[in-house]
Image (tube, grey):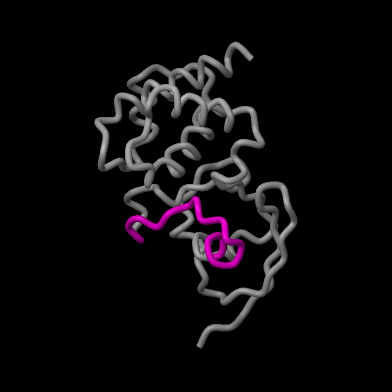
Amino acid sequence: MSGKIEIALQVNGQSVTRQVPSEMLLVEFLRYELRLTGSHVGCDTTQCGACTVLRDGDAVKSCTLFAAQCGGASITTIEGASATQPGRAVVKAFHECHGLQCGFCTPGFVMSVVELVSKNKALDEKTARHLVEGNICRCTGYQNIVRAIMQAQSELAGA
C-alpha cells in the first residue's frame, strides 16, 4: 500500500508543493497534477526520450523518476523552455529547420537540445548526433534535428 508524501519543488520558475503518492512518476506529476502536458509518455522504458525535462539543468527522462525524488529540485518542462535564452533559440531553430514532423517527440528533443547547447559551446554534427541518441523520432531521418541543433548553437554563440 502506497503512502502520500509532500514534495516541494520549482517547476518552470514557480514554487509547487503537493501531496502525492510515493510511487507517482515525475511525468505523471507534471501531466496530471500540474496539467503540463508537453512531456509525453512514449514507451515507459526510458527508450524514446519523449518525456525529457530538465532537472537542475540536466536532461532527465521523467518516466523513470519518482516525483518524490525531485523534492527541492528545479524542473523545467517544454512549457517553461521559452523563458530561457537557450530554450527560445532551440525552439526557433526547430521551427526554422523543420526539425519535427508529427511533433510527439519534439518536446523531449527540445529539452535534450537545450541542455546540449547550454553545456557544449563547440559541437560538431557527429557529437550532436551522439548526444541525442537517447531520443527517438519515428518520423524523421534526424538530419533536420541535427541542423536545428547546429543552428541553435550558432545563434547562442553569437548572442
Question: Could you tell me which residue is drawn at 52 percent across and 47 percent down?
Answer: 53
Q: Position of residue 75 (x, y in %)?
A: 62, 50
Q: Position of residue 141 (x, y in %)?
A: 24, 30
- The quarter of the image holding the C terminus is top right
Residue at 50% in and 88% down? 1
6 w.r.t. 124: above or below: below
Residue positioned 47% across, 33% down in the render: 113
Q: Give the residues drawn in magenta, as a range.
A: 29-44
Q: Left of 136 or right of it: where is 90?
A: right
State whether residue 109 is above or below residue 34: above
- Magenta region includes residue 75: no
- Majority secondary structure of magenta residues: loop
Residue 3 placement: quadrant: bottom right
Residue 42 lies in the magenta-colored region = yes
Residue 32 image-quadrant placement: bottom right
Give the residue drawn at x 39%, y 32%. 131
Nearest to the observer: residue 22 or residue 149: 149
Say left or right for 24 vs 104: right
In the displayed image of the protein, which residue is found farthest to the bottom? 1
Q: Position of residue 59 (x, y in %)?
A: 51, 43
Quadrant assignment, res 132:
top left
Q: x%, y% of residue 38?
A: 50, 51
